[in-house]
């Protein structure tokens, strides 16, 4: 089946590359939809060639167009741009510091480090790949700058991810389990987790953000055909979210939904969306027993202690590392080079745990308080930029990308209390795309690059 699978994914990859050359906006949208698909559906290499896959080929075409057809960008928020580069520099330095002490990581068997067997491979996985993802998303956001095109692209992303999740759940037997009244648990079932190709904590954030995007599009950005597509996509995304059985799922959904409801202008719509979000939350508690147990624990001992109780075997031993490297941290994957890592790993089952299940603690360990402050400053400047754009399109108009970006950032921050990572990864593609959409000033209909065979009037 491997040659057929390679050929199947080579077709959309080549089609996306050709679309980029013929009609740039359509090609960029197709590339982003490919990036949203579950990782298990995307082969890491095609025909055995390392680096040649369904994403890299059109990504190279996209970057090539940027190199050969550049234009000066529109005005940016200087403080936001400075905050981005400072945060990016600190995160990059943390990876380089860890690569210089790679021997301390090489002794640890971890799923996350499986492909990083040398310092060069480590730099490739944790610098070059994230830079490629961010560069592609930035170029897409610079191209698809009109609100109308952004709405079409986001709708395609919602439908594409829903289709991908439906394929995964149908092929792995999860739909049959749902039909029998059993909620699949990809958090504790390695085979089902492999079907999605990612961790439950990472998958839930992408699904929560997509549900938020679907809601913003339904209210502000879709006509009847689009609302039908969204209506068919949301149940699939909700089923996939239920399979995560993650505490972070509840945190992400509550935080994102709260901001989503607060952004509504009309009192009637605010009540309606609040009731709908409350209904979906209660439905999730009823359908998923693990969600209900976590909610009961929160009511019994309080939110923080319910969260702390599950992670105390990880967080308590790391207190000394925080104190010892408080200012600038100890480099990427600092937890794995902690003197007490073996104790932490043993408590977690000896599976080579690679992060402390708290994005803010990971950031403190890796980059110190300097890095924490830089990333928080970046997010604060992003919030200011998105709020500026939110209602800046004209009287009565709302920017869907800015609204979804604010909700997504809230969901990410809440999810970071129980998992996630401060570093860009495959499952945060939609988050970074929304941030770029919401922070880059809108322009007229003229695209950033002139499609092949067309001139700018």
Image (spheres, rainbow, N blue to C red):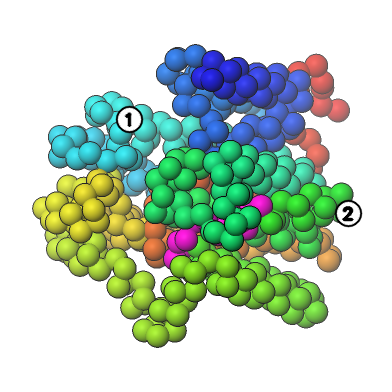
Q: Label 1: which residue?
A: 115
Confirm or deny contact between disc 1 and disc 2 (CB under 8 A). Answer: no
Q: Quadrant of residue 369?
A: bottom left
List the residue tagged with mark 2.
224
- Looking at the image, residue 17 sits to the left or right of residue 373; the answer is right
Q: Position of 95 compared to 401: left or right?
A: left
- Position above or below: 352 against 251: above
Q: Main secondary structure of the magenta part?
A: helix
Q: Is residue 245 visible?
A: yes
Residue 74, percent across and down?
Answer: 66, 41
Give the percent coordinates (x, y) of residue 397: 81, 62
The quadrant in which the C terminus is found is: top right
Q: Residue at x 33, y 40 (%)?
A: 112
Range of magenta residues: 236-248
Question: In the rendered view, would you say 431 is above or below 141?
Answer: below
Asked if residue 105 is among those painted magenta in the image, a careful observer would answer: no
Query: Where does the image place residue 96, in percent across and percent down from the top left?
Result: 27, 37
Closest to the observer, 427 or 149: 427
Q: Secondary structure at mark 2?
A: helix
């Amino acid at each position: 089946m491997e040659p057929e699978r390679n050929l199947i994914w080579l077709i959309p990859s080549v089609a996306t590359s050709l679309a980029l050359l013929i009609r740039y906006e359509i090609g960029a949208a197709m590339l982003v939809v490919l990036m949203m698909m579950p990782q298990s559906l995307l082969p890491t290499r095609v025909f055995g060639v390392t680096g040649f896959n369904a994403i890299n080929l059109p990504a190279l075409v996209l970057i090539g167009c940027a190199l050969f057809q550049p234009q000066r960008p529109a005005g940016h928020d200087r403080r936001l741009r400075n905050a981005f580069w400072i945060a990016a520099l600190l995160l990059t330095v943390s990876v380089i510091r860890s690569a210089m002490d790679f021997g301390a990581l090489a002794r640890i068997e971890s799923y996350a480090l499986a492909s990083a067997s040398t310092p060069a491979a480590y730099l490739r996985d944790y610098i070059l790949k994230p830079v490629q993802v961010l560069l592609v998303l930035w170029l897409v956001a610079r191209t698809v700058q009109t609100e109308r095109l952004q709405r079409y692209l986001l709708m395609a992303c919602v439908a594409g991810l829903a289709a991908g999740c439906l394929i995964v759940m149908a092929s792995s037997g999860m739909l049959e389990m749902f039909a029998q009244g059993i909620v699949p648990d990809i958090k504790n079932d390695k085979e089902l987790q492999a079907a999605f190709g990612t961790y439950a904590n990472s998958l839930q954030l992408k699904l929560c953000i997509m549900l938020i995007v679907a809601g913003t599009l339904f209210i502000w950005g879709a006509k009847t055909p689009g609302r039908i597509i969204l209506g068919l996509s949301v149940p699939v995304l909700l089923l996939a979210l239920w399979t995560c059985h993650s505490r972070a799922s509840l945190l992400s959904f509550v935080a994102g939904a709260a901001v989503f409801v607060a952004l509504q202008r009309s009192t009637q719509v605010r009540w309606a969306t609040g009731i709908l979000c409350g209904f979906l939350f209660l439905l999730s508690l009823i359908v998923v027993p693990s969600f209900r147990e976590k909610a009961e624990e929160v009511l019994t001992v309080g939110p923080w202690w319910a969260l702390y109780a599950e992670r105390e075997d990880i967080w308590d031993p790391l207190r000394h590392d925080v104190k010892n490297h408080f200012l600038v941290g100890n480099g990427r994957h600092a937890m794995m080079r902690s003197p007490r890592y073996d104790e932490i790993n043993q408590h977690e089952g000896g599976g080579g745990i690679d992060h402390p299940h708290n994005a803010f603690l990971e950031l403190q360990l890796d980059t110190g308080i300097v890095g924490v402050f830089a990333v928080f400053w970046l997010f604060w400047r992003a919030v200011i930029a998105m709020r500026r754009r939110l209602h800046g399109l004209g009287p009565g108009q709302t920017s869907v990308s800015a609204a979804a970006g604010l909700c997504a950032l809230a969901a990410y921050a809440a999810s970071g209390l129980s998992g996630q990572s401060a570093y860009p990864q495959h499952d945060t593609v939609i988050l970074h795309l929304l941030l770029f959409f919401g922070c880059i000033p809108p322009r007229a209909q003229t695209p950033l690059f002139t499609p092949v065979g067309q001139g700018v009037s």
